[in-house]
């Protein structure tokens, strides 16, 4: 990876951190989280989103409304490198 690419890699962390913050603030709409994360990534000049998935942690099925534990998984290409990251969010009630 080039130095420029390494600087841009932080968009994955920023997108996942935003999802966590929005969840902590009460957002339970998976589409809203996905959209907000995509905006963070797309604001990064050389980043191309392969996917952002929000799924039930137990079943790994895609969800629209967040109830219980979830897994957020994403893949992003920066330059010639494909990066994958994820975040597990557990309900505060668990």
Image (cartoon, rainbow, N blue to C red):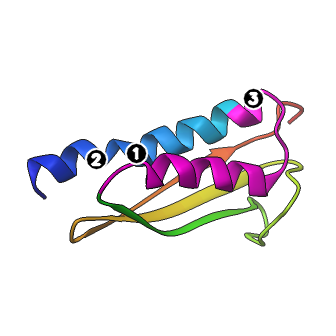
Q: Tell me the residue that label 2 is attached to.
A: 8
Q: Secondary structure at mark 1?
A: helix
Screen quadrant of the N terminus: bottom left
Q: Tell me the residue that label 3 is attached to.
A: 24
Tag 3 and tag 2, C-beta contact below 8 Å: no
- For residue 84, which quarter of the picture? bottom left
- Name the N-terminal-most of marks 3 and 2: 2
- Name the N-terminal-most of marks 3 and 1: 1
Residue 35 in the image, given as x and y percentages of width and height: 66, 54
Residue 3 in the image, given as x and y percentages of width and height: 10, 47
Give the side of residue 22 with respect to residue 2, left or right. right
**Closer to the camera, 46 or 90?**
46
Q: Magenta span covers which residues?
A: 22-45
Q: Is residue 36 above or below residue 22?
A: below
- Mark seen at residue 11: 1
- For residue 30, which quarter of the picture? bottom right
Q: Residues within 10 Å of mark 3 (few under 14, many from 20)?
A: few
**Residue under the image location 55 percent in, 36 percent down:** 17
Is residue 83 within the magenta segment? no
Give the side of residue 41 with respect to residue 22, left or right. left
Label 3 – label 1 distance at C-alpha: 20 Å
Label 1 – label 2 distance at C-alpha: 6 Å
């Amino acid at each position: 990876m080039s130095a420029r690419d390494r600087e841009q890699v932080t968009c994955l962390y920023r997108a996942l951190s935003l999802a966590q913050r929005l969840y902590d603030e009460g957002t339970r709409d998976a589409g809203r989280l996905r959209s907000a994360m995509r905006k963070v990534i797309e604001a990064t000049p050389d980043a191309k989103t392969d996917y952002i998935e929000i799924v039930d942690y137990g079943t790994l099925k895609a969800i629209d409304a967040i109830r219980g534990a979830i897994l957020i998984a994403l893949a992003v290409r920066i330059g010639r490198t494909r990066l994958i990251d994820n975040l597990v969010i557990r309900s505060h009630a668990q």
